[in-house]
Amino acid sequence: MLTARAWRFRALRAGCALRRGGVALYPTEGVWGLGCDPADARALARLLAIKRRPAAKGLILLAARPADLRRYVRLPARWPAPGPRATTYVLPARRAAPALLRGRHRTLAARVTTHGPAAALCRAAGGAITSTSANRSGARPPAGRWAVLRQFGPQVDAVLCAPLGGQSRPSRIFDTLSGQWIRP
C-alpha cells in the first residue's frame, strides 16, 4: 500500500518535471490524466501530440484551489462546494489564456480537485496544470494503471504513481454560461 508520504514525494518530482516543460501522467478522481504547464506552448503542443488530440478541442485545467485558475479564467464570485462526484466547470477564458489551451473556444473548462495526489501535483507544479484523460483522442481510456503506463509511459517525462480517487468515470462537466450539463 502506497502511503500518502510516498505519493507526496512522487508529486514533488512530477511537479519539477512540469515546471521544466515536461508532460506527466497522474491519477485523478476517476481516470489517469496527462498534464503539463498550461502556460508552456511547447508542453501543450507535445501533450496534444501524445494524446493525438486536435488543438481546436482545447483542454481542461486542474488546480488545488480556485485562486490558481484566476490567470486563465474568470472565476465565479464563489466557487461551488465540492460534491460527491468531481465536477468540471466551463468558464469564460481570459484573453491571456493560450490558444492551445482554449482551442476554438472563448471558454475554458476548469476543476478544483480534492483528490490528494492530483492536488499535490498541482501544488508542486506551482498552480494549475492541464488535465486531459490518458487515452488517445476518441478512444476509451486504457483499463488500469499498467495499461496506461504501457501506452504512455515512454512518451512522458514523469509518472505520479498513486491511487485513483475511486470514481468510476471522468468528472462531470457543467457549462456555467448556458446552465447546461455537457457531461452529467
Image: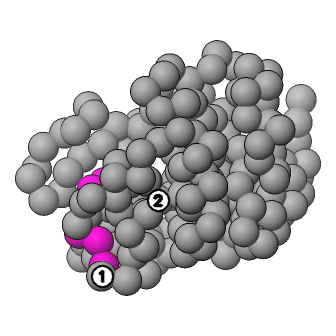
Q: Is residue 5 magenta?
A: no
The image's mark for residue 95 is 1
Amino acid tagged 1: Arg
Task: Residue 49 in the image: state x and y as whole percent.
Answer: 58, 47
The image quarter in which residue 93 lies: bottom left
Instruction: Name the residue carrying label 2.
Output: 61
Report which quarter residue 128 is drawn in: bottom right
Residue at 55% across / 30% down in the picture? 136
Instruction: Examine the residues drawn in magenta and state their main secondary structure.
Output: strand
Amino acid, disc 2: Leu
Task: Kindly check if marks 1 and 2 are in contact, taking CB atoms under 8 A apart as contact.
Answer: no
The residue lying at 47 percent from left, 59 percent from top is: 61
Cα distance in 3D space between marks 1 and 2: 16 Å
Q: Which residues are magenta?
A: 88-94
**Direction top: furthest residue:** 143
* Above-or-below relation of 108 to 10: below
Residue neighbourhood size for the residue with mark 2, other residues' Cα within 10 Å, grouped as few (<14), some (14–19), many (≥20): many
